[in-house]
Image (cartoon, rainbow, N blue to C red):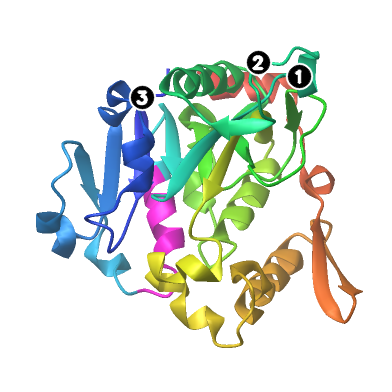
């Protein structure tokens, strides 16, 4: 079972999109991760975890906060969700040929969200899977239920028994793309990822329209890109990751614009069976 749902949040005391989308039983598992100075502003009936004061205002506050969450979760199964997520479900016809809705996808029901949690928990029981994530809702459907060794962001489920073995070594040197760096740190140590093609998410903070939802990103839009992934700082962060994992990222030019590709399978280093057994001691 996924025991806790950690939601790191800042300046959002009155607008918790992810929390409101969860069924009540899952709301009861939520831990909002906040700055101490904002605690009095939050009135949601859930658990709270205050980040250390020395994190507040740091350039890499988000990266340090996420590492703090991993450390706090210990050896449990847990989820870490951004605070502005809407969950979606894709038509099963793409995987088994049997349609179960009138459209290709739609917002998830509470029952489907429970099923998503149960599925993630089951997958995390597999020896090589330590991180499970969802597909972005605007991507085209795949023809399989899930794919392994894929990048996953914003909504992830984790097996703390696996993560705790490397968490103290997780690199928090960059402000953005820190979630990709975390994935590389994991897969290079034998902790594989799995991405569902059936369960999807929409993150409202990714586009410039919602940039103020994430104060940490506001100054990244000075060169007016369409979204955070086209900013200069994002590519500088990717360059940092490439220097650390040379086989993990390649850059190329397309119509005068720098693009990149991620190669998680070239970084993934499966552990031996005996080493994997150590995760469950």
Which residue is the site of mark 1? 93
Of circles 1 and 3, the one toward us is: 1
Residue most toward the bottom? 223
Q: Residues within 10 Å of mark 1 (few under 14, many from 20)?
A: few
Q: How far apart, in angstroms, are the residues tagged by discs 1 and 2?
A: 7 Å
Most extreme residue toward the left is: 40
The residue identified by callout 3 is 3
The residue positioned farthest toward the front in the image shown: 102
Q: What x and y, as percent, mark residue 176?
A: 55, 67
Q: Earlier in the sequence, mark 1 or mark 2?
A: 1
Q: Residue at x 63, y 20 (%)?
A: 101
Q: State the SS at label 2.
A: loop
Task: Identify which residue is drawn at 34% across, 30% down.
Answer: 4
Magenta extent: 58-69
Q: Residues within 10 Å of mark 3 (few under 14, many from 20)?
A: some
The residue under the point 55% across, 34% down is 88
| Residue 205 versus residue 232 in the image, above or below | above
């Amino acid at each position: 079972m996924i025991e806790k749902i950690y939601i790191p949040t800042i300046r959002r005391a009155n607008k918790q999109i992810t929390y409101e989308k969860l069924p009540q039983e899952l709301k009861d598992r939520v831990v909002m991760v906040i700055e101490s100075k904002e605690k009095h502003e939050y009135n949601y009936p859930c658990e709270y975890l205050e980040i250390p004061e020395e994190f507040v205002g740091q350039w890499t506050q988000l990266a340090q906060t996420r590492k703090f969450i991993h450390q706090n979760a210990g050896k449990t199964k847990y989820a870490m969700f951004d605070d502005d997520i809407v969950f979606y479900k894709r038509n099963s016809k793409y995987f088994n040929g049997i349609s179960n809705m009138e459209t290709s996808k739609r917002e998830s029901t509470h029952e489907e969200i429970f099923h998503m949690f149960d599925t993630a928990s089951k997958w995390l029981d597999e020896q090589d899977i330590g991180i499970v994530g969802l597909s972005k809702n605007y991507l085209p459907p795949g023809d399989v239920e899930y794919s392994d060794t894929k990048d996953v962001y914003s909504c992830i489920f984790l097996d703390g028994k696996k993560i705790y073995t490397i968490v103290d070594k997780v690199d928090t040197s960059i402000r953005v793309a820190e979630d990709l760096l975390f994935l590389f740190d994991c897969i290079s140590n034998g902790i594989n990822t799995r991405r569902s093609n059936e369960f999807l998410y929409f993150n409202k903070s990714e586009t410039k329209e919602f940039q103020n939802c994430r104060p940490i990103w506001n100054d990244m839009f000075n060169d007016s890109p369409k979204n955070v992934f086209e900013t200069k700082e994002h590519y500088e962060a990717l360059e940092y990751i490439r220097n650390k994992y040379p086989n993990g990222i390649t850059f190329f030019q397309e119509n005068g614009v720098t693009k990149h590709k991620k190669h998680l399978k070239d970084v993934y280093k499966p552990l031996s069976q005996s080493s994997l057994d150590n995760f469950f001691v």
